[in-house]
Amino acid sequence: MPRSFLSSLDHSRHARWLQRITGADQALAVCDAAGVPCWTAPGHTDLEQWLLHLNPEGFVWQTDGEGMQRHDAPDATLLYQPVMSKGRRLGWLAVRVARVDGAADAPFEWDALAEALEDIAASIGDDYVTHGELNAMADELSDRYEELHLVYAIDRQVQDMTSGEDMFGNLLESWAEHMNADVAAFIKPGDNLCVSATNLSAPIHNLDLVLVEMRGDLYRFAHSSRQPIVMNDANDPRRAYIFTDMPFKILCCPVFQDKSVVAILVLLNHAEKPDFTNSDRKLGEVLANHLSSLSRMHSMLAETSKFNQQMAAALIEAVEAKDPYTRGHSERVHHISMEIGRALRLPPRELDNLFWGSLLHDVGKIGIPDAVLCKPGRLTRDEFTFIMVHPERSYEILRHIDRLKGAVPGARHHQEKYDGTGYPHGLEGHDIPYNARIIAVADTYDSITSSRAYRAGRSHEVAMAEIARVAGTQLDPAVVDAFAGLCLAEPDWIAAFGISRDTLPETTAA
C-alpha cells in the first residue's frame, strides 16, 4: 500500500516547494521502500534510469538517523531522505546533484536542501497517516452503512408485519441475500421456533440435520458462552463437539432478553466461501439485538392475539347461548369469509380486519330479546325491526376497542345490499365496505345451508343457485364470482361443516 500511496500523491507541488526554497530546479525523485522510482521531476527524463543503475554498482539505501544521506556516484552525487511514518519507512526522496568530492567540500546550499527534504518527507508522512485514518473512517462508515441497511430492512419488515414466523422468515431471507450466506436461521427453543432461509451457492442435502444441530449443541454452547461464535477453520477444536463432521463455516450470535440467552441467530456457509469477518460478526450482533426486540414484540402480540380470540369466543358464546340453532354460525361465516378474502388476495392488514369483522359480525344480537331471536315462525314487522338493529348494536359494542376499528365497518354493514335496499344505512355498490360485501356472501351461504327451528339446512347446490340469483342485487357480483371459483375446487370445509349435497361431483377413474 505505501507504494500505491506514494504514486497517488501530487509530487509536482513537492518539486515546486523544493525549487522555491533552494532557488534551483532540482532533479527530484520519489522512490518506494525498495528504492524503485515512483515519480521523477519533469525535465529530468534520465533520472529514473540513473537511479536504477546505482544498485548494480553496489549502492544500497543506507541510513544514519532520519536526516538527509549522501552517496557519491562516479558521475554525480545522490542526496536522499527517508520518508517515515510512525516508525515505518514508506520510501525515499532522492535528489541528484553535481558531484562534490569530500564531505568537507559540501556546499552550504545543501543545508537548505536538507531542511526542505525533511519538511517534504514529514509532510508525506503526515499525509500517509491522514490517508490511513480516512481509509479507516471509510471502512467504519461502510460498516455503519451495512448496519443501517439492516436496521432499515428490519423497520420495513416490522411496518409490513404479518404473522410472526413470516416476519422472521422474510427478514432472514433479506439477511441471507445481503450477507451472501447459504443459510440464515433464527432458533428459539423455548418457543419451539426454528425459522430458516436459504441462499444456496451449492446444495446442502442434510439441511434438516444441520438445523437439528443448531437447535442442539450449537444453541447450548452459545447459551453457556454468551458470546458470538465464529468457526471458519476446518480444524477449529470446537468442531469436536459442535457441528461434528460438518465442514461448514458458522457465525452464531446469541439473542438476549433480560440478560438471558433465549435464542440464537446463525449464518452458515459452505467451506469454499470466504471466512466470516469481524465486520460480519458486528452486523450479526446488531441484527441479534433487533431480533431480540422483535421476538419480545412477537410474544406480546401472540399473547394479545390469544386474549383477543378468547374475548371474541366469550362474546360469541354469549350470543349463541341465546339461540342454540345459530351455534357455530359465527365461526363458519368467519372461516368462509377468510377463504374468500385470501382468494381475492386481500393485503395482510385487510385480512386481519376481515378476520375480526367476520368473527364478530353478529355480536350485536346479544341485545335482541330472546322471544324475537329464538322465534321459530315468521317474524312480525316490529320483530324484524329488532333484528335490523343488530348491526348497529355490533358497532356500538366494538367501536370502543381501538384494536378493532378496522374491523368495525365489516360487522356494521354486512346486511347492506348491493342495490341499496339493505340496512342499517342503505349503502349501495362500492360504497359498502369491501369486507362487509365479503361477509355478506359468507353469511348468506351459511344462512341457507344451516338448519333452523322451522326448517332443515338446504344443500350446497341450492345455496349456490340462490347466491347466483341475487348477485348484483343483494350481493356484490365480483365477490360472488370469487366465491364460486373457490367452491369449484371442492374445499374441505363443505364436508367439514356437514353441508348436504344434491349430487356429488364426478370422480375420475384411476
Image (spheres, helix red, strand yellow):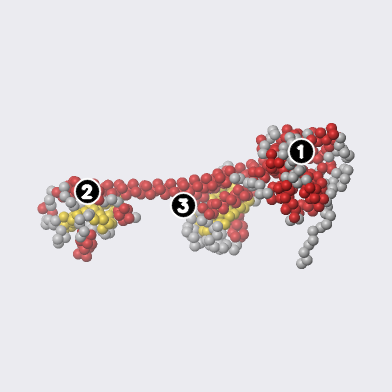
Disc 1 marks a residue whose amino acid type is Thr
Q: Secondary structure at mark 3?
A: helix
Question: In this figure, which residue is indicated by the disc labeled 3?
Answer: 278
Q: Quadrant of residue 46?
A: bottom left
Q: Where's residue 235, x and y in %?
A: 49, 62
Viewport quadrant of the C terminus: bottom right
Disc 3 or disc 2, which is closer to the eye?
A: 2
> Which residue lies at the image location 79% right of the left edge and 38% below the top edge?
319
Disc 3 marks a residue whose amino acid type is Asn
Disc 1 or disc 2, which is closer to the eye?
A: 1
Q: Where's residue 25, x and y in %?
A: 18, 51
> Which residue lies at the image location 48% right of the left edge and 55% below the top edge?
276
Packing grade of label 1 (10 A; few <14, some 14-19, many >=20) is: some
Packing grade of label 3 (10 A; few <14, some 14-19, many >=20) is: few
Question: In this figure, which residue is indicated by the disc labeled 1?
Answer: 421
Q: Secondary structure at mark 1?
A: loop
Residue 504 visible somewhere in the drawing: yes
Packing grade of label 2 (10 A; few <14, some 14-19, many >=20) is: some
Distance from Cα at disc 1 to Cα at disc 2: 94 Å
**Relative to the observer, which residue lies in front, 280 or 238?**
280
Q: Secondary structure at mark 2?
A: helix
Q: Where's residue 151, x and y in %?
A: 52, 45
**Relative to the observer, which residue lies in front, 76 or 419?**
419
Disc 2 marks a residue whose amino acid type is Arg
Q: Earlier in the sequence, mark 1 or mark 2?
A: 2
Mark 3 and mark 2 residues within 8 Å of each other at the beta carbon:
no
- Which numbered dot is residue 16? 2
Q: Earlier in the sequence, mark 1 or mark 3?
A: 3
Disc 1 or disc 3, which is closer to the eye?
A: 1
> Which residue lies at the image location 74% right of the left edge and 38% below the top edge?
420
